[in-house]
Structure formats: structure tokens, C-alpha cells
Amino acid sequence: MSELLETLETATGDNPVGTVIWMHGLGADATDFEPIVPMLQLAQPLRFVFPNAPIRPITINGGMEMRGWYDIDPGAPLAGSEDIDLSAQQVAQLVEREVESGVPSNKITLAGFSQGGVIALHLGLSYRHPLCGIMGLSTYLHDHEHVAERADFANVDTPIFMAHGLSDPMIPITRAITSRETLLGLNYSVQWQEYAMGHQVCPQEIADIAQWLNQIYS
């Protein structure tokens, strides 16, 4: 059992009805999405857990060490598979911690941006207990051709929210669309949004995230 990830935690009110575990992107940290929480117009209080990814060398950035959920090697797209599996296991420990504290798994949502979204999708689809939702922002499915082999039936009906920038220079929207079509082909329910932006988050997206969270936690 690996050491529990460092986390930043906040709640939007007393007695939260559920927990959102939200993973940051490459080179960012747990503070990255915390400022968005007060902007979400939520109908019910939620607890937010923002984990820090481990620091590791990243091949695409010349081996520079930074927070990352997995290595990215442009010459070997599947090179990060072991890292992704390990990161998913570490986030699963956070899910289990929430369950042990009294939050049922079906009140826990996995969310992530870019690399963090890869982990949210990877863990969410394979997790063996039902979750409340899976949110992937400006991201993609790792090794999408083999998703069916690692998916677990427990989350086949779990709502998935995917959003992407039309002019994303880091992760082309075509890659996200391929991921979406893979999920739809496996009968997952995917809410898809696209925005006139790059590799970022925009105000309309924040409003759409809040609407989706209100829907799944209604």
C-alpha cells in the first residue's frame, strides 16, 4: 500500500451530500482548481478533495521533474501505463478514505483536468463500486482501444461529463472526440461540451460543471 497522497480539502457548506476528488494537470498542484469551487453555484453542499500528484521526471519536458500523474513520452504513447495504474491506485485510496469516513461510493465523483482527467476516467471506469459521476476536462482516454478490457460493470451507468477547447494546442479535440466515441460505443452516458478556448477552463464551462454536479447530486 503506497503512502496516501497529500491533499487540499474544502467544503461549500455544512453536512456535504457528497465528495468530489479533483486531479490537477501536469506541472500544476492541488491549489490549481480550488479557486473554482466558490464560483460553482451548487444547490447542495459538497466536499472537494484536491490531491497533489507525485513529483517525477517528464520525458516530453526534457526530463524535468514536476508534479505529474504519469510520464509523457511523445515517441511512446503508452509508456505512461504503469504510472497511470499506480496513480489510479493512489486516488482509489482517497476514495476508500471517504467511504471509511461515511461517504458512500455512489456519492463520490472523480474529476480531473488534462492528465488528471486521464486518471479520473481510468479509475472511474475500472472502479468496482458505483460512483456518482466522472468528469474529464480537456483530456482523453488512455489506451482507448482496450478500455472494454479494464472497465468494470459497476460504473456502466455512471454519468460522465467531458469538456474540451476547440483550439486546444496540448491535447487536440480530435483525441477527446475519439475518447467520447469509444465511451458511447460501450453504452456509457456522456455529456459533451466544447468551448472556443485552448487548454484551459472558461466561465461557461464552470457554469456547465455546476449544472452537471447539481444534476447528479439532486
Image (cartoon, grey):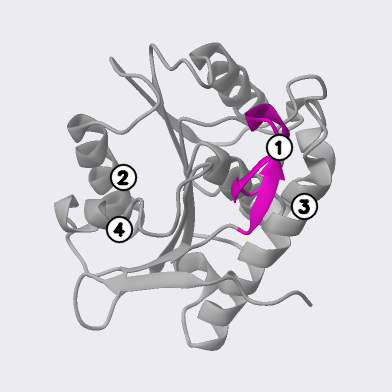
Nearer the observer, disc 3 or disc 4? 4
Q: Give the position of the N terminus as an image quadrant.
A: bottom right
Left or right: residue 210 versus residue 21 is left
Q: Is residue 160 above or below residue 176?
A: below
Separation (CA) of disc 2 from disc 1: 38 Å
Image spot of residue 134 (x, y percent): 50, 48
Counting other residues with Cα less than 10 Å from the Cα at mark 3, is it few (<14), some (14-19), or many (20 or more)? some
Name the mark on residue 63: 1
- Residue furthest bottom in the image: 101
Separation (CA) of disc 1 from disc 3: 21 Å
Nearer the observer, disc 2 or disc 4? 4
Asked if the residue under mark 2 is in contact with the one under mark 3, i.e. CB atoms within 8 Å, the reply is no
Name the mark on residue 34: 4
Amino acid type, residue under disc 1 in the picture: Gly
- Badge 3 is on which residue? 85
Badge 3 marks a residue whose secondary structure is: helix
Residue in the foreground of this view, choosing between 140 and 59: 59
Task: Magenta stretch: give its range.
Answer: 54-69
Q: Is residue 198 above or below residue 216?
A: above
Badge 1 marks a residue whose secondary structure is: loop
Q: Give the position of the C terminus as an image quadrant.
A: bottom left
Residue in the foreground of this view, choosing between 24 and 154: 24
Counting other residues with Cα less than 10 Å from the Cα at mark 4, is it few (<14), some (14-19), or many (20 or more)? some
x 51%, y 66%: residue: 106
x 33%, y 60%: residue: 217
Amino acid type, residue under disc 3 in the picture: Asp
Nearer the observer, disc 4 or disc 1? 1
Nearer the observer, disc 3 or disc 2? 3
